[in-house]
Image (cartoon, rainbow, N blue to C red):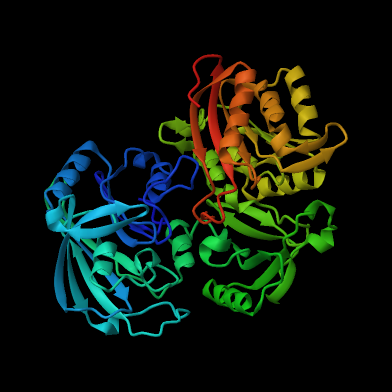
Amino acid sequence: MPPGIPLVVFEDEHLLVVNKPPGINTHAPSPHAGEGIYDWLRNREPRWTNLAIIHRLDKETSGVMVFGKTSLANRSLTEQFTSRTVRKKYVLFTDRPVPKAELTVKTSLVRTGEKYIARPASTGGNLAETRFRLLPATAARIHEEEKLTRPLHVIEAEPLTGRTHQIRVHAAHQGFPILGDTLYGGTAARRVYLHAESITLNHPVSDQELSFAVEAQFEGDRSLMLREAVIEPGLTNAYRLIHGERDGWPGWYVDRLGDFLLSQGERTPDAAQSRKLADLLKHFSGRGVYHKTLTRRASATSRPEASPRHCFGETAPERFRIRENGLQFELSFAEGYSVGLFLDQRDNRRRLLNGYVSTGFSLPNVAAGNPKPELSVLNTFAYTCGFSVCAAKAGARTTSLDLSKKYLEWGKRNFELNEIDAAGHEFIFGDVFDWLRRLDKKGRRFEIILLDPPTFSQSKEYGVFRVQKNYGELVKAALRLLKPGGVLFASSNAADWAPEKFMATVEGAIHTAKKTVIQSHYVSQPLDFPSSRFEPAYLKTVWLRIDSKGSSKL
């Protein structure tokens, strides 16, 4: 297994064991929501294509999870869970009095809205049984920023059944709701203090008893734990650390960019935010911190005014490098509103690099490991050519199209950073719509076409482009250049454009062009850009394999 994926605890031919961080669902709650840990794993590596969910952890519960990788493992694990031979132990914190040092709770569970309530076992329904045991309070280590007024108690919980919310309901039913579990009456806290500490089962082939245990890290930063579980430190040092409301900081965003931190918000960081930035800088042994003021009129702001400003620590050189998926990219804090790479497209760039989009969906030629010379990729609105670098590194011949000569030159430097000869690739300066027509007249065709336009742009040739108004026209223009069986990548970061309407626009354009979708994969923003009810996912992306007119699979 790749040593760089920190959350992987164990893997062999039949089993995958992970340490799920808090803040991730077991699986995506809806088609257009962010990926759960199951979806993220399954769509990340071809060898995880057949992963099966055997048991679940709640979104805010951390700890050990087991997935089956083969049919044999799935049957064996399902039988073990059904017969209750699998032993699981959790640890939880509560700030309420615990009635006994040891107790067993057996009730039925009944769902009411988004929560469950305990009813006497005699009433029937789904029976649930949990053993609780009070542990020494010296083990109670919590995040230093928690403000509690009551003493903490540490409890070991052993669920003898596997009902949804079982431990949470039973703890609340006995008068000691879990710290942070406000749904069941717990005191508000930075996270739900519940951790799946260990699981013991028999291997599906050898029948050997296996135990997997991961100690709870309740004192750690919940947001940081999420990132450090899913980001490979040896390959990537640029990602989002704080994403607004979901990470407890509404309206504030922080990115790690190699040795530097970039804060983003409508105002300069206040005292609490500055302390947080200092803590993060120390944690990463970073060099300096910058801040970018977010504005709705970024295009009307001059480059010096729009550029991030130095806050504290060392100043960054005019150009510096970061790592992403094992590649290098040049960034700059001196070039205006954007620093050179959009971090929310990291997973999609990896898909181009590895040739693996999702389960059963591989990119043409790239996935074989020996791409054919004729594989061609058209990257529209290329910016600094991040997608192109990944495709070229995978062996494709790329054409990067952008309205800015400066950014295309920046893109060429990114090629050179990764030891790719830019002379073997095309860099075209001009309006995308104009050049799509020109390339069509020349008979140019591509296996992969990438569409990731800005929400607003303006050119002499086309005029004003507004993503919600003109995206369908862009898709139709691109489809004329796509080879039969080719892949169209369509993406937008327009926050006020609902995923359903985005998909309807893409689907309508494909239908109008008399094309059909024979394969599709929708994906939202990566796990370090978590969404919430109050701050839904803004990034919408769909990978589509397109052919001539027929029955669509969209």
Please report the residue visible at 69 percent of the width from the left and 57 percent of the height from the top: 331
Left of 414 or right of it: where is 211?
A: left
Judged from this view, the residue extending furthest toward the front is 123
Q: Residue at x 18, y 70 (%)?
A: 132
Q: Is residue 438 above or below residue 240?
A: above
| Residue 201 occupies quadrant | bottom left
In this view, the residue in front, 245 or 12, is 245
Residue 410, how many percent across, how many down? 74, 49
Query: On screen, 152 above or below 91?
Result: below
Residue 448 seen in this snapshot? no
Q: Is residue 58 above or below residue 218?
A: above
x, y percentage for residue 42? 38, 42
- Tell me the residue at 36%/51% (across/down): 26
Within the image, what quadrant is residue 543 found in?
A: top right
Q: Residue at x 25, y 67 (%)?
A: 173
Q: Is residue 427 left or right of residue 415?
A: right
Q: Between 144 and 240, which is closer to the camera in this rendering?
A: 144
Residue 237 location (% of width, % of height):
55, 60
